[in-house]
Amino acid sequence: MIVSGGLWAAFQRHIGRIMAYGSIAETGLFLLALSLDLRLGIPILFLLLPARALTLAVWSLSLTILKEHSETLRFRSVRGMLRAFPVASIGLVVASLSTSGFPLLAGFPARLALWDSLSRVSLSTSLWMGVGIAGLLVSSFRTLAVLSMADEYTGWEVGEDWTQGIMLGLGLIGLFILGLFPQIVQNFLSNLPGMFEHLGQ
């Protein structure tokens, strides 16, 4: 799932489908975490959950704003929208980078922990995980390139209303806080894995 989602996202030319393939790849990360020893996999799983929830919230709100002001979500329709909707465009790119595990963002600590644990069990599987993440990174940078390709004479403006701007701003701050201080979530969720200890018995 990680490899197929990442590679399909890398060659996709529709920003809505990129989000869908990113979600597929992230579901694969959840399954990989569950495949590890429960003492390692369950804490990683509960580290993935809040990052995924916040990332999807920022990504979907950004997509909704851009969709309201473009014919489709294909690259040709959203080209240069960074200048008209900067907050939504930045939210879209940052959420996409977080899904690909870009450093300093919410998705990075859990993916690093998963990759480290996985490399001790199976080097080939950790290599395939890297291929999927590389595909997600490619899709993020392609999206950034398309959104910033405006004509030189196009002026800058803020098309989002203040409510959308505040919600996206808080979401973006949250993505950086979760990336820089993952222990906040870990402390909050430390007792949750205990609720699931007896499921396999």
Image: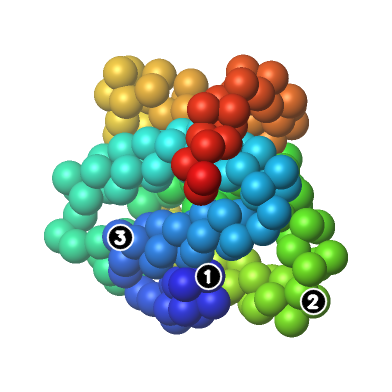
User: Do the residues bearing badges 1 and 2 touch, measured as CB atoms within 8 Å?
Assistant: no
Q: Give how far apart the Cα atoms at labels 2 and 3 are.
A: 32 Å
Label 1 Cα crowd, 10 Å radius (few <14 / some 14-19 / many 20+): many
Where is residue 158 drawn, in percent x and y? 37, 32
Kind of element beneath mark 2: helix
Drawn side of residue 97 relative to residue 166, left or right? right
Up/down of 57 relative to 1, above or below? above
Looking at the rendered structure, the kind of residue marked 2 is Leu
Q: Which mark is residue 16?
A: 3
Q: Quadrant of residue 60?
A: top left
Specify which label sits upstream in the sequence, 1 or 3. 1
Q: Which mark is residue 2?
A: 1
Up/down of 127 relative to 140, above or below? below
Read off the residue under disc 2.
123
Residue visible at 32% across and 18% down?
A: 162
Up/down of 124 relative to 197, above or below? below
Drawn side of residue 84 relative to residue 117, left or right? left
User: Do the residues bearing badges 1 and 3 touch, measured as CB atoms within 8 Å?
Assistant: no
Q: Quadrant of residue 167?
A: top left
The answer to whether residue 144 is visible is: no
Where is residue 179 drawn, in percent x and y? 68, 35
Residue visible at 52% across and 45% down?
A: 201
Tag nearer the camera, 1 or 2: 2
